[in-house]
Image (cartoon, rainbow, N blue to C red):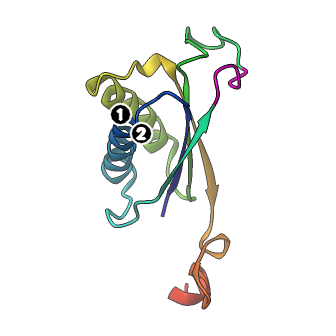
Amino acid sequence: MPFNKLHVPQALSADTCRAINEELHESLVETCGVNPDDHFCLVARYQPGDMLLHPRFLGERDPEATIVIEIALLEGRTDEQKERLFKDVRERLNSIGFDANNSIMFLLENDPADWSFSPAGSVKSVLGL
């Protein structure tokens, strides 16, 4: 059950943000076996000048146009799945007209005891895992 957080420039359109998240979700389903119904995303906008990063660290990018894709998900994916995810998301970004060079992605892995969607408790206790 991933929760995606997109850190995007203030000027990036809501339609582009939705398209990025849709492609990200589809990639998670295809490369990491994520349940298609586990579709959660928060868009966090930043003002010009608020993205402080080295413009050439491990690749050229435009700091004023760079997005950060933060994915929190249950642990258990292989390194191969993660590599496929990163490659697939970048291909999908390019396919919708967003320069994938202006993207940074990272995963935060956790387990079912770290998630809660209701007053009943953690996902682990609710599902009896």
Is residue 127 placed above or below 104 in the rendered structure? below
The residue at 40%/51% (across/down) is: 32
Circles 1 and 2: CB atoms closer than 8 Å: yes
Q: Residue at x 68, y 24 (%)?
A: 51
From the viewer's side, name the closer residue of 54 and 91.
54
* Above or below 34: residue 124: below
Q: Percent position (x, y) of residue 39?
A: 40, 60
Residue 68 image point, x, y percent: 57, 33
Q: Residues within 10 Å of mark 2 (few under 14, many from 20)?
A: many
Res. 68 visible in picture: no
Label 2: state its secondary structure.
helix
Q: Alpha carbon of mark 1 to alpha carbon of mark 2: how far? A: 5 Å
Residue 88, numbered circle: 1
Q: Position of residue 87 (x, y in %)?
A: 40, 29
Residue at the spot x=61%, y=72% of the render? Answer: 115
Q: In the shown orientation, is residue 73 left or right of residue 113?
A: left
Q: Is residue 50 left or right of residue 1?
A: right
Magenta region includes residue 20: no
Q: Mark on residue 85?
A: 2
* Range covered by the magenta-colored residues: 47-52
Q: Is residue 28 visible?
A: yes
Asked whether residue 49 is drawn in magenta, I would say yes
Dot 1 falls on a residue whose secondary structure is helix
Please, what is the three-letter code of the amino acid marked with disc 1? Asp
Q: Disc count in the image?
A: 2
